[in-house]
């Protein structure tokens, strides 16, 4: 119950911020893992939601979820080349308004299947290292 209350408080605070992308109605889809606990997955998701809220002006995050064990295993090279122990891959869907976000995205469009690659050292915080298709 405490976890749910913390997540609700986290998203309420994010929705009150004045700049960046919109995360107030993001749908977080739970995906089970044999490698990561739900807390570890949620921590990775929180990392991306915070970044999206701060830096993705003109964009609305619709949904985000763990891409699955098979997908993340395929990205282990990202951890290796960045001197980290673990990698996790998230999938998302977001909308871009008429501004085109930061100018590199297509205005008035939806991006489905967008991946986020995060790395960490064992039990450390997740760090976002790349994103895209």
Image (cartoon, rainbow, N blue to C red):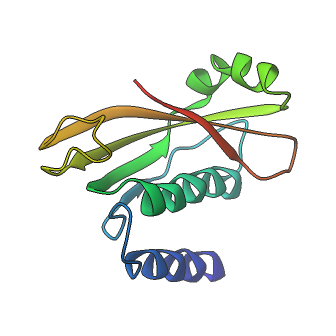
Picture coordinates of residue 4, whole percent (x, y): 55, 76
Which residue is at a point 15% across and 41% down the rendered structure image?
Answer: 107
List x then y, in percent, for residue 25. Answer: 30, 67
Give the residue at x 57% y 60%: 46
**Residue for point 53% across, 62% down:** 50
Quadrant assignment for the C terminus: top left
Eyeballing the image, is 14 above or below 56?
A: below
Residue 74 or residue 20, whichever sits in front: 20
Q: Residue at x 28, y 48 (%)?
A: 101
Image coordinates for residue 69, horizontal then vertical, percent: 62, 29
- Whether residue 71 sits left or right of residue 39 in the image: it is left
Res 113 → quadrant: top left
Residue 89, located in which quarter of the rendered image? top right
In this rendered view, identify the residue nearer to me: 89 or 18.
18
Q: In which quarter of the image is the N terminus?
A: bottom right
Near-viewer residue (104 or 8): 104
Image coordinates of residue 130 in percent, x first then y, are 56, 32
* Image mark count: 0
Instruction: Identify the residue at the far front of this view.
Output: 103
Q: In this view, does 47 lie above or below 96?
A: below
């Amino acid at each position: 119950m405490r976890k749910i209350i913390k997540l609700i408080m986290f998203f309420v605070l994010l929705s009150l911020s004045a700049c960046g992308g919109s995360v107030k109605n993001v749908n977080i889809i739970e995906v089970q893992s044999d490698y990561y606990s739900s807390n570890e997955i949620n921590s990775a998701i929180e990392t991306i939601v915070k970044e999206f809220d701060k830096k993705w002006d003109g964009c609305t995050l619709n949904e985000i979820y763990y891409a699955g064990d098979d997908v993340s295993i395929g990205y282990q090279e990202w951890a290796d080349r960045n001197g980290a122990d673990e990698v996790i891959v998230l999938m998302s869907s977001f909308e871009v308004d008429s501004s085109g976000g930061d100018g590199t995205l297509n205005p008035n469009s939806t991006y489905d299947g967008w991946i986020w690659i995060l790395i960490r050292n064992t039990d450390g915080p997740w760090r976002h290292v790349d994103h895209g298709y």
